[in-house]
Amino acid sequence: MSKRVKFALITWIGESVSGLQRAKTGTDKTLVKEVVQNFAKEFVISDHKELDEDYIKNELKKAGGANYDAQTE
């Protein structure tokens, strides 16, 4: 069974950030993506409730394709 490590690219943009500042994060994120090219899922989060560990783990599991752990769940 394959146990491939999955990485998430998480961008935190607070709710009070203006539209212009949000747009500026796009260029920074592009630079990060040039260096870190191997990630399974990208998240853009503005509310700390969206940082739920179980939610992120489940999304990464879905992004990984075949779920060999389905028999144990």
Image (cartoon, rainbow, N blue to C red):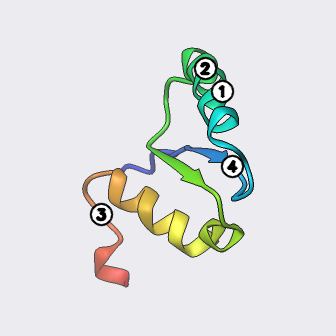
| Circle 3 crowding by C-alpha within 10 Å: few under 14, some 14–19, many from 20 | few
> Mark number for residue 12?
4
Q: From the viewer's perspective, is the residue at label 3 or at label 4 nearer?
A: 4
- Residue kind at label 3, given as amino acid type: Asn
| Circle 1 crowding by C-alpha within 10 Å: few under 14, some 14–19, many from 20 | few
Closer to the chain start, of discs 3 and 1, is 1
Disc 2 versus disc 3: distance between alpha carbons?
34 Å
Q: Provide residue 42's location: percent of width, then percent of height.
A: 49, 44
Disc 1 vs disc 2: Cβ atoms closer than 8 Å? yes
Closer to the chain start, of discs 3 and 4, is 4
Query: Please, what secondary structure does the residue beneath circle 4 have?
Result: strand
Instruction: Work out whether 21 lies above or below 46.
Output: above
Q: From the viewer's perspective, is the residue at label 1 or at label 2 nearer?
A: 1
Q: Mark 3 points at which residue?
A: 67
Query: Please, what secondary structure does the residue beneath circle 1 have?
Result: helix
Instruction: Work out whether 24 lies above or below 40.
Output: above
Disc 3 versus disc 4: distance between alpha carbons?
28 Å
> Mark number for residue 24?
1
